[in-house]
Amino acid sequence: MKPGSSERIKTALAALLLLTFVAWFFLPFLLDRALVAERDAFSSLLPMKAFLGRALRAGVFPWWNPAPGLGKPFFAEWNTAVLYPPSALLAIAPLSRGANAFFVFHLAATGLGALLFLRAIGVEPIAALFGALVWTCGGPLLSLGHLVNHLAAIAWL
């Protein structure tokens, strides 16, 4: 990639187009008309994220979840992501809206990462945009929608 300002403008325009497309593609989620939930999500993941969202909204640190059985540690559990900054999106009520914001945020982040990576290795802006769109909206990544910890890890990679 050339260091000139016209190249930076092209990259910024490609990023804007990418984010616009991601917002359009996932509009049902952003409008709270859909929810990614399958397999273990209803019995394990969504109740855990609902508890975290309620605690964050109440301004209470979620050390202990009193709901399951007679209660159990929450902060110490491996998959709660209490200290993960984007978990703050779960505080958006209702739970479906917060979970969808979490989902779309990570897809947008990984799309931007793919775009910037492709531009850094010298791929032209339109090709980098296409590559980032294929990565972001492709089946392998979308299949991680109900595995939010995996999705978050992939997004940062």
Image: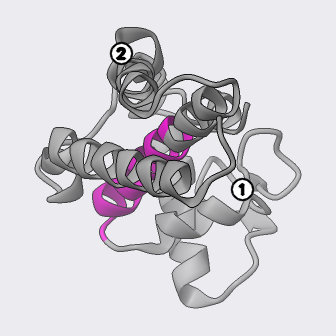
Instruction: Name the residue at 38% across, 45% down.
Output: 14
In the rendered structure, which amino acid carries the disc numbered 1? Answer: Gly
Looking at the image, is mark 1 or mark 2 nearer the viewer?
2
Quarter of the image where one finds residue 70: bottom right
x then y, percent, for residue 89: 50, 66
Image marks 1 and 2: residues in contact by CB distance under 8 Å: no
Q: Identify the secondary structure beneath mark 1.
A: loop
Residue 57 seen in the figure: yes
Residue 66 seen in the figure: no
Q: Looking at the image, what colour scheme do you see?
A: one colour
Instruction: Name the residue at 34% across, 50% down.
Output: 19
Closer-to-camera residue (15/60): 15
Q: Identify the secondary structure beneath mark 2.
A: loop
x then y, percent, for residue 128: 46, 27
Residue 71 numbered mark, or none: 1
x then y, percent, for residue 18: 34, 43
Magenta segment: 94-111
In the rendered structure, which amino acid carries the disc numbered 2? Answer: Gly
